[in-house]
């Protein structure tokens, strides 16, 4: 199963005599995903993934980790998750 999630396209428009601090803030705002986008993406992926896992594995637990979970993801980052089933659930 492939899950497609629309993310904003990065734009890199640094111009003018702005200070290096301002340029860094602009760059950061254009490459780091907003926390609400991370939350939305996680929700959309898990909504599609959980039914597939339940049909395939039966009872299981999905845990997320990584930059999406911490809110430090760059635009285009991957989504990290682990699946526990069987004896690992106890």
Image (cartoon, rainbow, N blue to C red):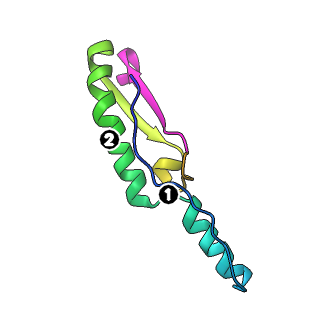
Q: Is residue 34 above or below residue 19?
A: above
Magenta-drawn stretch contains 57: no
The residue to which callout 1 is attached is 33
- Residue that appears at 58% across and 61% down: 11
Q: Are marks 1 and 2 in contact (CB under 8 Å)?
A: no
Looking at the picture, does residue 44 appear above or below residue 1?
A: below
Q: Quadrant of the C terminus?
A: top left
The residue tagged 2 is 44
Neighbours of disc 2 within 10 Å: few (<14), some (14-19), many (20+): some
Tag 1's secondary structure? loop
Q: Is residue 85 magenta?
A: yes
Q: Residue at x 40, y 55 (%)?
A: 37
- Residue at horizontal 32 percent and vertical 41 percent from the top: 44
Residue 48 position within the rendered picture, expressed as x and y whole percent measured from the top left: 30, 31
In terms of secondary structure, where does tag 2 sit?
helix
Quadrant, the N terminus: top left
| Residue 17 higher or lower than 3, as above or below | below
Whether residue 59 is visible: no
Which region of the structure is painted magenta?
77-90
Structural distance between the alpha carbons of marks 1 and 2: 16 Å
Q: Residues within 10 Å of mark 1 (few under 14, many from 20)?
A: many
**How far from the left and from the top, in percent, is residue 25?**
61, 74
Viewer-proximal residue among 69 and 45: 45
Position in image of residue 85 (x %, y %)? 37, 19
Q: Nearer the viewer, residue 39 or 19?
A: 19
């Amino acid at each position: 199963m492939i899950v497609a999630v629309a993310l904003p396209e990065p734009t890199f428009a640094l111009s003018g005599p702005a200070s290096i601090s301002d340029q860094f803030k602009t760059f950061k705002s254009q490459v780091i995903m907003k926390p609400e986008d991370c939350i939305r993406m996680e929700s959309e992926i898990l909504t599609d993934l959980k039914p597939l896992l339940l049909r395939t594995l039966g009872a299981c637990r999905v845990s997320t980790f990584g930059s999406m979970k911490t809110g430090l993801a760059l635009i285009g980052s991957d989504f990290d998750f682990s699946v526990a089933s069987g004896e690992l659930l106890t």
